[in-house]
Amino acid sequence: MINNLLKYGLLFIGLTILQIFVLNGINFLRYATPFIYIYFLIKLPVGISRNLLLFLGFVLGFVIDVFCNTPGINAGASVLAAFLRPYLIKSLATLDVAENREPSLYLFGLQPFLRYIAVMILIHHAALLLLESFSLFNWQILLLRIPACSLFTFVLIWAAEGLTGNQRKR
Amino acid sequence: MQNLINFLIRYNTWLFFVVLEIVCLTLVFTFNPYQQSIYISSANQVSGKFYTAMSRFSGYFNLRSINEDLLEQNGMLQQKVLMLEQYIENNMKDSVNDAIFTNPQNKKYEFVPVHVISNSVTRINNYITLNKGSKDGLQPEMGVIDQNGVVGVISNVSENYSIVIPILNSKFRLSAKLKKNNYFGSLVWDGKDPLYAVLEELPRHASFAAGDTIVTSGYSDVFPDGIIIGTVDSHTKQHDDNFYAVKVLLAVDFSKLGNVLVIKDKSRLEQKALEAQTSQDK
């Protein structure tokens, strides 16, 4: 339990710092910015209480918002992703949902896990970029940005997953 | 009553979700950068400290190019000073106006050098955080420039930090004009490219060519007249066909801002008071 608390605490802090100070400055080909902090929501244990999941999603997004001067935008997108997560897991993986383990390649199997990450990222990014573009709507840019950012985030998360997965095998 | 409580217990997750989303959406839609609470912004004590610490490292990255810019600027200024000195000397003997140059009260503007501690160019609404605030006399609606040209306007100030709305923000709007013939329009950002902004509402009969300089008009009290914003890149007709929309290549490279200057206008309070008085008289 305490082990988990420490692990997820570090993950939270690490991801927010990475997001705020490094990734927010990246604008690959002027369209793609990765939002890797969603990885925290992806990795929370499968059996986590849904209210706690929502609350953590809100806190995570809000911290990012404070640093980026975008009140509500990141928080709204994270809460939506956190809300849809249990349904997504239920529909993708045939496993005991009460299980208190973190989502991983082992637990889900390759295809469902890939789909799980991809859909989480898509939900979050679509909501985030849509909310952001309310002040200046330009659907061409929006249509370009959602897949571009999602792809970028997906690559980064898959890389992070590869790194941590290998560690566990040893 | 019992049913209601049962309903609430049964759907507590849904309820919690809806409440959180309402909080978020309220934040999104009531957000006004000019009335923003300092606590939920990058100018609060915690995030300000974080950004200050990080900028100590990242501040070194662009030093070489910033140095080159400064040297160039320095050279130009030196030239200007020489020219002005010569001008004063030539006109000294017969001019009554030399008081203009020596009277300290005519130093209308004061420039405060500050350091950028956080900055973004990737969003639709970008913001810059500076490492000085009300303690150093900064106030909302002061103009910010760097050695190349206009950066933005201060929107919010805490004791030690302040937030700037740069040109690269959909909420930014600035009156600007063509330097050579004073036709003016209003400068906005279309959210597409951090290198370009758009000068809208330029009259159709205004003549200009690619490469012409765009400067501040001086109609607002935020920037003095004639500070460089950028150069004309290309133009299109606006939807109602009576105005041009000009694509402007910005003079400032927002992706490598390091040190900027805040313009303190000493006569501004006076102007404000006068304007307030006039509107009361009406």
Image (tube, coloured by chain):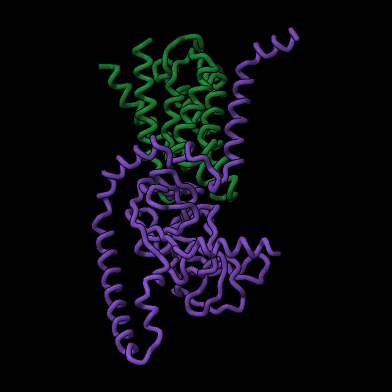
Q: Can residue B85 be seen in this view?
A: yes
**Which of B33/B270 is in front?**
B270
Quadrant for residue B143, please give it.
Answer: bottom left
Q: In this view, does A99 lie above or below B63?
A: above
Q: Is residue A110 above or below residue B172?
A: above
The x, y position of residue A55, in whole percent, is: 52, 22
Q: Which quarter of the image is occupied by the C terminus of chain B?
A: bottom right
As drawn, is A25 to the left or to the right of B269?
A: left
**Which of A99/B231 is in front?**
B231
User: Which residue lies at the image location 53% right of the left edge and 47% below the top edge?
Assistant: B33
Quadrant for residue B64, please give it.
Answer: bottom left
The x, y position of residue A125, in whole percent, is: 51, 36
User: Which residue lies at the image location 49% right of the left edge and 11% below the top edge?
Assistant: A95
**Which of A99/B114 is in front?**
B114
The x, y position of residue A144, in whole percent, is: 52, 46
Number of numbered discs present?
0
Please identify which colour was used for chain B in the image: purple
User: Which residue lies at the image location 45% right of the left edge and 72% below the top edge?
Assistant: B226
Q: Which quarter of the image is occupied by the N terminus of chain B?
A: top right
Q: In this view, does B23 lie above or below B5?
A: below
As drawn, is B257 to the left or to the right of B4?
A: left
User: Which residue lies at the image location 45% right of the left edge and 47% below the top edge?
Assistant: B157
Please identify which colour was used for chain A in the image: green
As drawn, is B19 to the left or to the right of A100?
A: right
The x, y position of residue B73, in whole percent, is: 30, 68
Q: Work out which residue is located at the far top of the displayed protein and give it.
A: B2
**Which of A98/B180 is in front?**
B180
Q: Can residue B122 be seen in this view?
A: no
